[in-house]
Amino acid sequence: MRFVDFHTHPYRPDDLAPGTREFVRRISPAVREHGDRLADPAFVAELLRAQGAERAVVLAEHCPNSSGNVRTETVLEICRQVPDFFLPFASVDPNTDPEPAALLRRYLDDGAVGLKLYPSYQFFYPNERRVYPIYEVAQERRIPVLFHIGSSVLPNTRLKFCDPIHLDDLAVDFPDLVVIMAHGGRGFWYDACAFLAAHHPNFYIDVTGLVPSRLLAHFPDLGRIADKVVFGSDWPAMPRSPGENAAAIAALPLPPDAVEKILRRNALRLLRLDPAPAAPAPDPGA
Ligand SMILES: [Zn+2]
């Protein structure tokens, strides 16, 4: 099963807050099995490719007051080592970076191809005017912005900032900005995220962190919004593997074309990569 993983985190234990580190160690079979080898980008790329991944987005996480402090510089360095596989997404913190928009511009000049924002870990509402300069840069440079939108078990999370209604203003104020709702409103806001994705041309859902067999219960119209959904895993902070989750999505009662869009075609389009079929990946069971 070939897929693009739109949502992975580098395993850098020293950069994670203690609660995040403990959570990842507890939940992740990959960390238990491979430990420090996950610090080697070439090893990780091989591991994910063997499961069927064509490309993987690697997310920085600059959330010094909560989950961790995996800086964009670190992610750029990781991605540079396997440039035909990894895609770096920057992270800026509206509360601790003095000039987050200028910083984002610099990260994009250095090779970042997207931005991840964490309202519940960074403590801002996505429609606060003070963060608008960040979106101006993202819209001008035509990069997707992935927002953490949904529940979390990590310490110091403030869920109120994740209510997807606060994204609705962005569809009006930044009509060309690509907004991706990571976790699809997990726990509270599935319907709101499905509505926003269906009605705003540049809004998408990333199904990271949702149990594949529950997807149709969360989003009964998943087949109808298949153009607006991307696949991600949260790897290595997940109880299974990206390949297993991709296979479970492929097994859902959806048209093959919808599965193909969710698992790879939408992501390739958003990342402005060649949507032509890539060489078949190795069979994970082989
Ligand atoms: Zn994540």
Image (cartoon, helix red, strand yellow):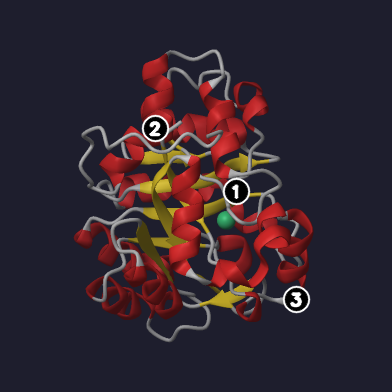
Q: Residue at x 31, y 75 (%)?
A: 107
Which one is closest to the eye, mark 3 or mark 2?
3
In the picture provided, is 94 more to the left or to the right than 200?
right
Against 65, residue 87 (above or below) is above
The amino acid at mark 3 is Pro
Mark 1 crowd level (few <14, some 14–19, many ≥20, 10 Å Cα):
many
The amino acid at mark 1 is Asp
Residue 228's mark?
A: 2
The answer to whether marks 2 and 1 mark residues whose Cβ atoms lie closer than 8 Å is no
Q: Residue at x 46, y 18 (%)?
A: 223
Tell me the residue that label 1 is attached to. Answer: 163
Coordinates of residue 199 in the picture (x, y in percent)? 39, 30
Q: Nearer the viewer, residue 124 or 282?
A: 282
Sequence-wise, the earlier of marks 2 and 1 is: 1
Residue 18's mark?
A: 3
Coordinates of residue 189 in the picture (x, y in percent)? 63, 38
Query: Is residue 281 visible to us here?
Result: yes
